[in-house]
Amino acid sequence: MNNNHVYDMLVVGGGPGGYTAALYAARSGLSVLVLEKLSAGGQMALTEQIDNYPGFEDGIDGFTLGEKMQQSAERFGAVTELAEVYKASLSRKIKTLDTSEGVFQGRTVVIATGATPRPLGVPGEETLVGKGVHYCAACDGAPYRGKTVAVVGGGNSAAADALTLSRIAKKVYLIHRRDSLRATKVYHAPLMNAPNVEFCWNSTVSALLHDSRLTGLRLKDVNTG
């Protein structure tokens, strides 16, 4: 990798947004470098089965779809560098990005850093990602149709995911460390009125029960311990 080369476009983030930008730019004849700190697809790569992306009638796993997006952009000359961006200097005509793999220069910078899930920090969580532990109901909820699921949190993301899952799952436990939701009021009534949603107030997850996949949760009452 020539770090002295000035690219037409630097793309920070190798998820769907980043590789779409890279594909359009590279296909238009621009030199493009994509900087991704983990793997192609970003958070999508953690999704076991994607059924709501057009063109794959039998669905596709997120890791494979991310690789296909990377290959589509690279077909037109885009380059991928696995690097974490530490600092961006964007005030001059030639922009610079300080990364774990050195300094890269470009005339334009596209920031497509996407979202990062907030893990619980419970032992074993990382090994169970995709095996019962998920971070997006819209992405990963479909396989749990008719089953019992739990959502941890009380903000907008947790409330929206619990509402989504209430239309799919047999039972939804909403686990929150406080005694009321922090989510916007618009979510409160639909969740309270959903017959299959049960609230576990003043609770945190103390353990993930599992064999090869998640089988249950152990909760801790924040007031009584």
Image (tube, rainbow, N blue to C red):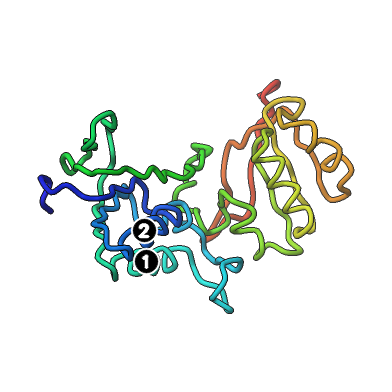
Q: Residue at x 70, y 22 (%)?
A: 224
What's the residue type where badge 1 is placed?
A: Glu
**Residue placed most toward the observer, 152 or 141:** 141
Q: Residue at x 45, y 48 (%)?
A: 126
Q: Label 1 neighbourhood size at 10 Å, few (<14), some (14-19), many (20+)?
A: some
- Residue at disc 1, secondary structure: helix
Residue 55 in picture, x, y percent from top left = 54, 75
Residue 72 in picture, x, y percent from top left = 36, 69
4 to the left or right of 55: left
- Residue at disc 2, secondary structure: loop
Answer with mark 2 or mark 1, whichever residue precedes in sequence. Answer: 2
Looking at the image, is 38 positioned above or below residue 202? Answer: below
Residue 118 tag number: none
Disc 2/disc 1 C-alpha distance (Å): 6 Å
182 to the left or right of 211: right
Position of the N terminus by quadrant = bottom left
Q: Which of the 4 image quarters holds residue 66?
A: bottom left
Residue 98 in picture, x, y percent from top left = 21, 35
Residue 84 in picture, x, y percent from top left = 28, 42
Q: Residue at x 21, y 40 (%)?
A: 100
The residue pinned by badge 1 equals 67
Total numbered badges shown on the rendered structure:
2
Position of the C terminus by quadrant = top right
The residue pinned by badge 2 equals 40
Q: Disc 2, disc 1: CB below 8 Å?
A: yes
Q: Label 2 neighbourhood size at 10 Å, few (<14), some (14-19), many (20+)?
A: many
Q: Residue at x 32, y 43 (%)?
A: 109
